[in-house]
Structure formats: C-alpha cells, structure tokens
C-alpha cells in the first residue's frame, strides 16, 4: 500500500506514538512544494521538533529492542544470500 507522507504522519506515526509528526509534515511539504517562505512560528517548530520527537519514539522501544532490530542478522544474511548470483550447473 502506498501512502502519502501526510497520510503516513497522520494515520500511522501520530496514532501509534502520540506525536506531532503531522504538524512537521505539513510544514515540510509547504517548504518543499509550495515555494513559500515559512513564518516565524513554523521555523521555530522545525528547529525544536526533533529532540522531543526522538525522545518520544525512543521511549516506546527498549534499548535491547532497538539494538536487536539494528543488528538483525536474519535480514543481513537474507540480503547477502539473495544478492549472490546463482550458478546453474550444466
């Protein structure tokens, strides 16, 4: 399923983690596509957005869960196993 960044922010990230990612996404999309200058409140929001957002997301996952996801050996092995060319025996 392909979702727009705004849909993803509203319906997946904000609902799951109770963040204000939608506000960030609206400002980001305005900056990227509308070719409009950001007002002072939007600039401040962008500058102050990341730290609280990161802390809220990190609080949802234990350190061991984050580390195990980062070091997911199954994905590593699958990637390299599937990316090797297959030799066909004649």
Image (cartoon, rainbow, N blue to C red):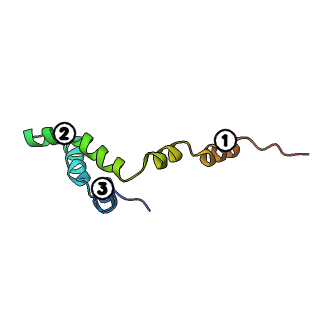
Mark 2 and mark 3 in contact? Answer it, CB < 8 Å: no
At which x and y percent is residue 89? 89, 45
Q: Does residue 30 appear to the left or right of 70 in the view shown?
A: left
- The answer to whether residue 37 of the structure is visible from this angle is no
Q: Which quadrant, please, contains the C terminus?
A: top right
Seen from the viewer's position, the closer of residues 57 and 35 is 57
At which x and y percent is residue 47? 19, 36
Seen from the viewer's position, the closer of residues 45 and 65 is 65
Distance, label 2 to label 1, CA atoms, is 39 Å
- The answer to whether residue 26 of the structure is visible from this angle is yes
Residue 9, numbered circle: 3
At which x and y percent is residue 22? 24, 54
Q: Nearer the viewer, mark 2 or mark 3?
A: 2
Q: Which residue is mark 2?
A: 48
Q: Residues within 10 Å of mark 3 (few under 14, many from 20)?
A: many
**What element does badge 2 sit on?**
helix
Q: Nearer the viewer, mark 2 or mark 1?
A: 2
Distance, label 3 to label 1, CA atoms, is 32 Å
Distance, label 2 to label 3, CA atoms, is 18 Å
Residue 80, numbered circle: 1
> In the image, is residue 51 above or below residue 25?
above
């Amino acid at each position: 399923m392909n979702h727009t960044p705004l849909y993803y922010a509203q319906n997946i990230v904000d609902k799951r983690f109770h963040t204000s990612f939608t506000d960030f996404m609206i400002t980001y999309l305005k900056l990227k596509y509308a070719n409009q200058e950001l007002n002072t409140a939007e600039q401040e929001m962008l500058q102050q957005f990341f730290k609280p957002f990161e802390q809220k997301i990190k609080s949802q996952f234990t350190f061991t869960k984050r580390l195990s996801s980062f070091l997911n050996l199954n994905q590593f092995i699958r990637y390299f196993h599937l990316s090797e060319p297959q030799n066909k025996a004649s």
